[in-house]
Image: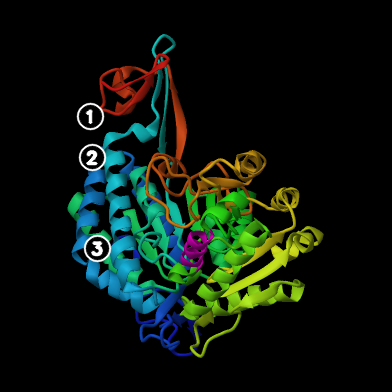
Amino acid sequence: MPATTTGGEISGSERVLIAGAWRLATAVDTYRAIDPTSGGQRDAVWPVSGWADVEQALDAATQAATELGQLPPATIAQFLERYAARLEARGEELVALAHAETGLAVRPRLTDHELPRMLDQLRQAAAAAREETWRMATIDSARNIRAAAFGLGPVVVFPPANFPLAYGAVTGGDFAAAIAAGNPVIAKAHAGHPSVSRLAAEEAAEAVREAGLPAATIQLLHGLSPADGERLVADARVGGTGFTGSQEAGQKLFAAAAAAGRVIWVEMGSINPVVLLPGAIAERGAEIAEQLVASVTGSAGQVCIKPSVVFFVDDLAAQACVAALQDRFAAVGGQVLLGPSGRDRLAAAVGKLRASGARIATGGTVGPGRCEFAATLLEVTAAELLAKPAAFLVEAFGNATLLVRCGSAAELVQAIATLEGALAAAVYLAHDGSDDDLAALVVPRLVRLAGRIVENRMTTGMAVSPAMQHGGPWPSAAPPFFSAVGIPWSILRFARRICFDGWSQQRLPECLRDAPPAGRPWRFVDGGWERA
């Protein structure tokens, strides 16, 4: 996505935040972000830091982790609340920068959905930090054995391109969860929206000062070489890493961290299957077609839970539904993607599908703009899919999806069995119960492969709720138990359980003492949950 520059601009014109100070990076390269609407480079020159910057950030974060561990939870909560208030006050600026750097619509996408979600996440994390139930404190009074969750230490956050606010390096769910657990964060800004990260980090640094947190609680680097990224996640000073992005980058970072025994949580690509059962299509095919078009083309399909493959039994009702889909996709036409590299990756994925034998129902072409691609509908038969599933089960990240025409209900069940792990899956059933027998075969298979199962809705659209699961089996994410959304599970990714065996009351962490902790958390005491 960024355009790399070389030569006399190695220092860059923008600064990094290390140990509470904004300073010029020890840059090994620079880049400029892209304006997706025009396809041209933006003015600011951003640095790709060398390892010297990383070294200093790691040392500062290590000291900050020790200091944070000694602060009361209310202080961390106060920071998150002040920070959310500061970001809210600059909401229009954040949205304007996010729009300029990603091309995502100001309304409704950024202003009405993503900005409120970002603020809500920060405030939910603040409430959880103050209240402390997330620690899952467990007390065995008779044996005087007590355990709870505590921060891991410095957390590195690698954000994705497609959510500059809700998943941003200094604003997103990984950031909020890591801070709520009492960890300092080393944020690596995404090259697709560096200005958003810079503005947010400015406000974070001020909120850190106001709340009295260590200066290195929040640090920001703009760019790293792939080799330094892998070195960073494997460093012994890193408590854990949160990554959201492509399978290629995520798998490399996962391997590097795992080889060194370091904690890393990755959310990667996912095809998010949708299964349309015959009764549902017969009952409301036109409505389902509208929902599928909205799901695939909303935000130009650049959402990690967008459906990339749709299964159905190819009867007369389904054929009418497909005809409606073709008309609606054609009406959408070209859409602006996040950048030229995103457009090129989507074009390559569609090209791979076509080369494997998928047929274009509509779209499949690049537009006149440098970042534009037409809303695309492809199709194959289940027999073709079963013959070579790896060729067709390809994530086309963007405004494209693949229809799988199944000759029978039995063939539909067979085709679903070829799927790998996914973040989400959806099944549409008839309201009159006519699909129930087939659903009894389909749903257990979807449960095994996806972290979140949706009934009679598309996979897109996800509430920030304690009950939400956003993660799934490999290769969509790892480890499969985590959730990037939903407290306490999002916070527990960046914590470890510590047991205090035989300790005296005055030396125990407050959350494990017999006296009720200040936040009044739920605790598991002598076999039962209680809240003092």
Does the image show residue 375?
Answer: no
Amino acid type at mark 2: Ala
Q: Indicate which disc, 2 or 3, sits on the residue closer to the N terminus.
A: 2
Residues rendered magenta in the picture: 285-296
Does the image show residue 77?
Answer: yes
Seen from the viewer's position, the closer of residues 82 and 275 is 275
- SS of the residue under disc 2: helix
* Residue 372 at x, y percent in the picture: 50, 83
Query: What residue is shown at x 60% (from left), y 55% (from top)?
Result: 273
* Residue 385 at x, y percent in the picture: 75, 61
Does 174 sit above or below residue 434? below
Membership of 125 in magenta stretch:
no
| Marks 1,2: beta carbons within 8 A | yes
* Residue 507 at x, y percent in the picture: 32, 23
Query: What residue is shown at x 51% (from left), y 73% (from top)?
Result: 328
- SS of the residue under disc 3: helix
Q: Distance from label 2 to label 3 (Cα)?
A: 19 Å
Amino acid type at mark 3: Glu
Q: Residues within 10 Å of mark 3 (few under 14, many from 20)?
A: many
- Check disc 2 and report the residue beneath it: 74
- Check disc 1 and report the residue beneath it: 518
Q: Residues within 10 Å of mark 1 (few under 14, many from 20)?
A: some
Q: Distance from label 1 to label 2 (Cα)?
A: 9 Å
Amino acid type at mark 1: Ala
Q: Distance from label 3 to label 1 (Cα)?
A: 28 Å
- SS of the residue under disc 1: loop
Instruction: Identify the image quadrant of residue 404.
Output: bottom right
| Marks 2,3: beta carbons within 8 A | no
Q: Indicate which disc, 1 or 2, sits on the residue closer to the N terminus.
A: 2
Q: Which mark is residue 203?
A: 3
